[in-house]
Image (cartoon, helix red, strand yellow):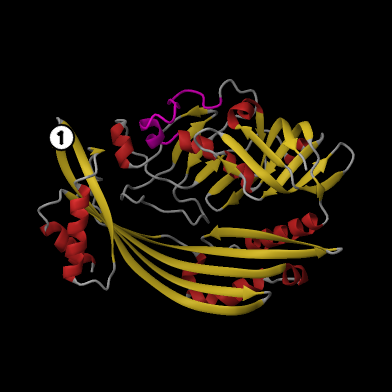
Amino acid sequence: MKNLLKQILTSMTNIDGWHILERKIESSEVFYVKDAIDMNRMKNVHHFDVTVYKDFEENNNRYKGSSRTKIAPTMSADEIKEALEDAAYAATFVKNQHYPLIQGYGEQSVVMPSDLSNKHLIDWVPEITKVIYKNEDTIKGINSAELFLNRNHYAILNSEGVDIAYDNHDVELEFITNWKNEGEEVESYKHISFSDLNKEQIATEIQTMIEISKEKASAEDTPSLKGINVLLTGEPAKTMFDYYLTHASAKSVYEQISTFKIGESVQGNFKGDAVTITLEPMLKNSSHARPFDGDGLQLKTTELIKNGKLINYWGGARFAHYLDLEPVGNIDNIVVEPGSKSIEAMKSEPYLELLEFSDFQMNGLTGDFAGEIRLGRYFDGHKVVPVTTGSISGNIHQVQEEFYLSTEIHQINNYKGPKTMQLLNMDIAGN
């Protein structure tokens, strides 16, 4: 099918370039109710995303039009030709400023190492099931779970000689925990992704959610607080860095959304911890690890922000070309350097530690962040009590000049960095 696609595309005289992304997915999916397997199935998916390009000029301006279409392996040659002709016509209506496609550098193929490659996916299910339901707490506390194990093959080709392929694995585990305490029953949802079978990580994540459910079942209403130090732990801390990633992208700079400039501070005149972010394309145990981006650009470790100053813009070949920069590529993994304070030191005075929200969001464009509290731990200087309800809101510009990052680091799939971020003098809307 791949050779047929190349043959048809090469023969088309009404396009000026093309790009093929092939993906084959072999998947083992398991669904649990309580600690029993309710259903399991195998799935094989194979498809092609094909983009065609048309170069043209209008009023002395050069454009590159593009249009993408999906091609199924079951399609006949005539059906493929019809789909590609439709895409070629649609491309003439797209007026993107002209840019070159990635140039080929020889055929390459990479197999990324993973524990899961040692045997068939379905053969891992009994072992992972034992990890999920390893003790009485997890058997009692997990209401349901879904497990997806995927073996992926990617191939990327284009009209400029790119011909690369790579294989990787990823695992997704979703589970719902329930806990009842004196008539109060609470439910929590968790989704984790990874690429290697780290049994300790899986067990820790599940046990943490069980403990969170227990605390939520006995939590009090969050009081209204003024000028309290807030500790964002886990996923919320990771989310706060979205602002820096958005504004450090070449696309945001080109579209004049971002004012970040290379060599300048991204935190203003800060006196807290400086942000240092590195893009790591092959981050171990990340389901987003890959040697090439979707354009076919070979990726490498790239410093993005160092000690609060922007070092590079990141992004694909198109927007890098517009800014006359060497392309870094689209890299989805970030490593953030630890800060200057231990979590213990952060907890030496009154604080509100926030661990779970209904939906904690950071607006990458404006820097606004907010979330409705599902579980926190409030220390008034004398005792720690679990709390729920209430909300937090703010803007990164109000806190970034003096926030602190924990010395303790952890990994959440494609993020490796401080476990906790300390925000000073925050106001909390209580219930």
Residue 354 rendering spot, x and y as whole percentages: 71, 44
Q: Quadrant of residue 142?
A: bottom right
Residue 259 image position (x, y, % from top left): 44, 26
Of all residues, the one furthest to the top in this rendering is 269
Q: Position of residue 422 (x, y in %)?
A: 69, 35
Q: Secondary structure at mark 1?
A: strand
Identified at 58% across, 74% down, the residue is: 31
Under mark 1, the amino acid is Glu
Front residue of 28/103: it is 28
The residue positioned 49% from the left and 39% from the top of the image is: 278
**Residue 207 visible in the displayed image:** yes
Identify whether 171 is placed above or below 94.
below
Residue 5 left/right relative to 125: left
Residue at the spot of label 1: 58
Q: Residue at x 52, y 36 (%)?
A: 243
Range shown magenta? 248-267
The quarter in which the N terminus is drawn is bottom left
Quick check: is 252 in the magenta stretch?
yes
User: Is the residue 129 above or below the residue 321 in the image?
Assistant: below
Q: Which one is nearer the viewer's eye here, 276 or 159?
A: 159
Q: Is residue 1 left or right of residue 190?
A: left
Q: Quadrant of residue 417?
A: top right
Q: Is residue 212 magenta?
A: no
* Position in image of residue 355 (x %, y %): 70, 48
Name the residue located 64 percent from the left edge and 33 percent from the top edge: 394
Q: 68 or 389: nearer the eye? A: 389
Q: Quadrant of the C terminus?
A: top right
Residue farthest toward the right in the current orientation of the protein: 382
Q: Give the prevailing secondary structure in the magenta stretch.
A: loop
**Residue sitting nearer the eye, 114 or 257:** 257
